[in-house]
Amino acid sequence: MKIAEIRELSTKELIERIDAETTSLNQKKINHSVSPLDNPEQIKQLRKTIARMKTELRQRELNNK
């Protein structure tokens, strides 16, 4: 997910997406520990996407104060 797509989301949608992506990341980590993923790069991409979303959420919090 690109930063432009993240900025289009509302704050509520952004929080929901962060929760969903975090759950997905945890599931992928568990699956990878049991049997290797075909593309372990997915874990890295998910971590970066979550970080982008959290960064955008934090920027919105700071701008509202």
Image: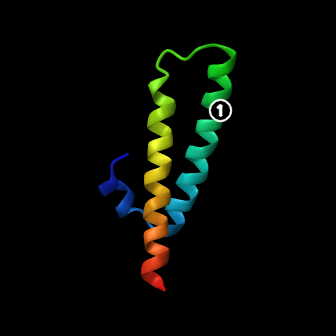
Residue 50 as seen in the image, left or right of residue 3: right
**Is the residue 27 above or below the residue 50 in the image?**
above
Q: Is residue 5 left or right of residue 19?
A: left
Relative image position of residue 53 (x, y in whole percent): 46, 56
Q: Residues within 10 Å of mark 1 (few under 14, many from 20)?
A: few
Q: Which residue is mark 1?
A: 27
Point 48% across, 51% down: residue:
51
Q: Identify which residue, 21 or 63, lies in the foreground.
A: 63
Could you tell me which residue is drawn at 42 percent across and 80 percent down? 63
Name the colour scheme: rainbow
Q: Quadrant of residue 60?
A: bottom left
Residue 9 picture location, percent across and down: 41, 62
- Which residue type carries mark 1? Gln
Q: In the displayed structure, would residue 38 be above or below residue 51?
A: above
* Residue at the image point whose x is 57% and y is 57% from the top: 16
State which quarter of the image contains the N terminus.
top left
> Image point 33% across, 54% down: which residue?
3
Q: Position of residue 4 (x, y in %)?
A: 30, 56
Residue 41, given in percent of the width and then of the height, sits at 45, 26
